[in-house]
């Protein structure tokens, strides 16, 4: 989904978090010239998605 919208995936990690009722927490690192809010809005529309947070990586030029 991310790649089709112009965001090249660079890394993905995830695991269920027992302290959060076993919900999965995923981290997706992408590279793109497009505004990150575009991908956030699309991911928020996923049926099982509870929330989306965006964080810039330190040491990476925009």
Image (spheres, grey):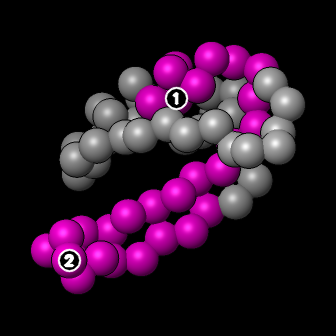
Residue occupying the far bottom of the picture? 18
Quadrant for the N terminus in the image: top right
- Specify few, some or many for label 1: CA neighbours under 10 Å numbering under 14, 14-19, or 20 or more: some
Q: Residue at x 40, y 24 (%)?
A: 41
Residue 20 locus on image (x, y percent): 19, 70
Q: Which residues are magenta?
A: 12-40
Residue lying at 75% horizontally and 29% vertically, measured from the top left:
32
Of residues 60 and 45, the one nearer the viewer is 60
Residue 31 appearing in the image: yes
For the point 66% across and 50% down, the residue is 29
Residue 19: mark in rendering: 2
Q: Which residue is mark 1?
A: 39
Report x, y in % for residue 38: 52, 20
| 29 on left or right of 23 | right
Q: Which quarter of the figure is the C terminus placed in? A: top right
| Residue plotted at (58% across, 53% down) | 28
* In the image, residue 19 lies in the stretch drawn in magenta: yes
């Amino acid at each position: 989904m991310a790649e089709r919208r112009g965001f090249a995936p660079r890394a993905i990690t995830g695991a269920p978090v027992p302290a959060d009722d076993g919900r999965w927490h995923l981290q997706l690192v992408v590279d793109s010239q497009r505004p990150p809010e575009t991908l956030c809005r699309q991911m928020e529309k996923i049926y099982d998605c509870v929330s989306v947070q965006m964080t810039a990586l330190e040491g990476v030029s925009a």
